[in-house]
């Protein structure tokens, strides 16, 4: 059964932040050789709530899919690449996920294999899009309102914006207590999120897009000094 991991790393000193930036390219040969790894992406992040085009030079992420949950945990803990990132970072957190629904593609691929789950745990949502350059400014002009709205939503457990290429490749990742609270945010007819979706559809702003839901199955490490899931699931 496929397992998905999303690891976040926070860097403090300028030299360590520069190292993390360089690793966006330099880590590619290393990650390809990690046993059991399938689809992977190295990502930077945005400032504020994360959903902005301004890079946050302190936070980077690694998204990966694995042959199994056992392999995912083993490699996250022992592989040279993750150990190297943890050594440089002042804090790291990995969340483990199981896809329950998906549509669209990422870099021309179908990265996630869906398995229905009865797990009552938190729900995670990942959206990814390649934005057409001619409409990038229009798209990002809508994002601050969405960022403000999601940041003030008491239901969201965790949220961040990441991406492979600033301005043109964007990924949003959020964790919610359940499908009801997530759907209420996403489908608010008068909210900025729905207005942005309508503009995207009418203007055909994306070259490629992906939408995936996951069940959260566990985590490792801390973010902000504690696990964001401390009140929801037992840490692995």
Image (cartoon, rainbow, N blue to C red):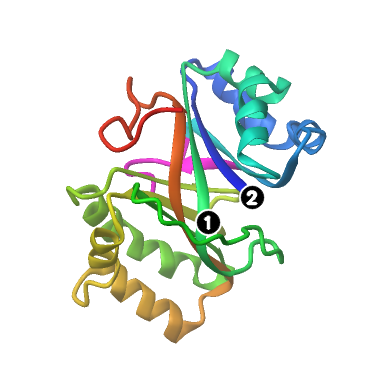
What span is colored magenta in the figure? Answer: 43-56
Can you say whether 195 is above or below 15 in the image? below
The foreground one among 233 and 80 is: 233
Residue 179 image-quadrant placement? bottom left
Assign a secondary structure to mark 1.
strand
**Image coordinates for residue 191, horizontal then vertical, percent:** 21, 70
Q: Which mark is residue 159?
A: none
The foreground one among 227 and 147 is: 227
For the residues marked 2 and 1, what is the alpha-carbon distance in whole angstroms? 8 Å
Give me the residue at 61% from left, 39% from top: 69
Can you say whether 189 is above or below 5 in the image? below
Can you say whether 164 is above or below 100 in the image? above
Q: Which mark is residue 99?
A: 1
Tell me if residue 46 is in the magenta stretch: yes
Give me the residue at 61% from left, 22% from top: 77
Q: Residues within 10 Å of mark 1 (few under 14, many from 20)?
A: many
Tell me if residue 67 is in the magenta stretch: no
Q: Earlier in the sequence, mark 2 or mark 1?
A: 2
Which residue, given by chain and number where applicable, does mark 2 sit on? 2
Residue 78 image-quadrant placement? top right
Q: Are marks 2 and 1 in contact (CB under 8 Å)?
A: yes
Assign a secondary structure to mark 2.
loop
Give me the residue at 72% from left, 20% from top: 80
Give me the residue at 60% from left, 30% from top: 73
Report whether 214 appears left or right of 48: right
């Amino acid at each position: 059964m496929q397992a998905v991991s999303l690891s976040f790393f926070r860097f403090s000193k300028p030299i360590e932040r520069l190292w993390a930036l360089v690793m966006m390219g330099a880590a590619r040969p290393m990650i390809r050789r990690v046993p059991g790894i399938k689809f992977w992406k190295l990502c930077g992040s945005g400032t504020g709530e994360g959903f902005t085009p301004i890079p946050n030079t302190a936070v980077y992420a690694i998204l990966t899919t694995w042959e199994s949950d056992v392999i995912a945990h083993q490699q996250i803990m022992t592989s040279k690449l993750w150990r190297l990132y943890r050594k440089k970072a002042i804090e790291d957190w990995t969340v483990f996920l199981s896809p329950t629904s998906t549509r669209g593609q990422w870099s021309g691929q179908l990265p996630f294999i869906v398995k229905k789950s009865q797990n009552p745990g938190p729900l995670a949502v990942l959206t990814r899009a390649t934005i057409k350059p001619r409409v990038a400014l229009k798209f990002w002009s809508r994002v601050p309102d969405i960022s403000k709205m999601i940041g003030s939503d008491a239901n969201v457990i965790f949220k961040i914006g990441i991406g492979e290429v600033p301005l043109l490749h964007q990924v949003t990742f959020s964790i919610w207590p359940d499908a009801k609270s997530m759907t209420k945010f996403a489908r608010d007819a008068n909210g900025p999120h729905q207005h942005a979706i309508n503009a995207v559809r009418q203007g055909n702003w994306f070259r490629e897009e992906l939408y995936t839901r996951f069940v959260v199955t566990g985590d490792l490490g801390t973010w902000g000094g504690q696990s964001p899931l401390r009140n929801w699931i037992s840490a692995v």
